[in-house]
Amino acid sequence: MLKITNISKTFNTGTVNEKRALTNLSLTLNEGDFVTIIGGNGAGKSTLMNSICGVFYVDSGSIVIDNVDVTRLPEHKRAKYLGRVFQDPMMGTAADMQIMENMSLAYRRGKSHGLSWALTSKEKKIYKETLSQLGLGLENRMGSKVGLLSGGQRQALTLLMAVAQKPKLLLLDEHTAALDPKTAEKVLELSDKFIKENNLTAMMITHNMKDAIAHGNRLIMMHEGRIIYDVSGDEKKNLTVEDLLKKFADISGEEFANDRALLN
């Protein structure tokens, strides 16, 4: 579903601020894979995700989604293949629009809507049934402005919108980092549920090592723009945070430099 081959990315080339973010990185995700990605500060995690989304072009290498080479496609043309949930709950929804209007944007994305944006009774019924899956009572507040929701409610709604059209690849970009622990746990449960029910291929960046171990079928560790550890199956299930810290130190020769991950 995703095949990345030897991609590299350097920012501010030829200046004192030159930064090599990705170096000849290759990665393949099969259909149904749910990969968690961890790494220290500046490891290249967000650069990898932004490269897939087309926020910027890579300097070299290729990115193929479901047998379509998107390496040189602009961001808006890649959007039809992707669903994305950002770290900031405010980024995935339109605050001044109603819940059902936001749902409509997600369900109608890329489709012809004729001369009218008016919601049909059939659409409202679908949105209500879908929202009920969240267990947050939003199905009874479909006329409320999204800006009135809590961060957790808004992030759950964003997740629901991201999977509405069953994307080829779901990208979760530290999507629970701004939430309190209880709400984060709820959003992660919903993530697991939607990925499993829709057999989605997914990639999740997280600073929480316990979450990286507990979720998904595969774990990737990055360091200085490279993948230094790739584990799946029973070996992943049996990992501990201590195992990951030791593995990082053994491979990189450094201590894991990320206070948020260690505190979690």
Image (tube, rainbow, N blue to C red):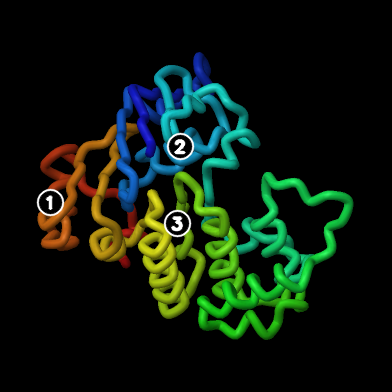
> Which quadrant, please, contains the N terminus?
top left
Dot 1, crowdedness within 10 Å: few (<14), some or many (≥20)?
Answer: some
Q: Is residue 27 left or right of 15 when viewed as pictured?
A: left
Q: At 18% across and 37% down in the image, what residue appears?
A: 252
- Residue drawn at point x = 83 percent, y = 49 percent: 114
Amino acid type for the residue under numbered disc 1: Lys
Q: Is residue 230 above or below residue 72?
A: below
- Residue under numbered circle 3: 174
Query: Label 2 is placed on what type of residue?
Result: Thr
Q: Earlier in the sequence, mark 2 or mark 3?
A: 2
**Closer to the N terminus: mark 2 or mark 1?**
2
What mark, if any, has residue 238 been given in the picture?
Answer: none
Where's residue 37, x and y in %?
33, 49
Element under disc 1: helix
- Check residue 246 in the rendering and tell me which mark sits there, or answer none: 1
* Residue holding disc 2: 47
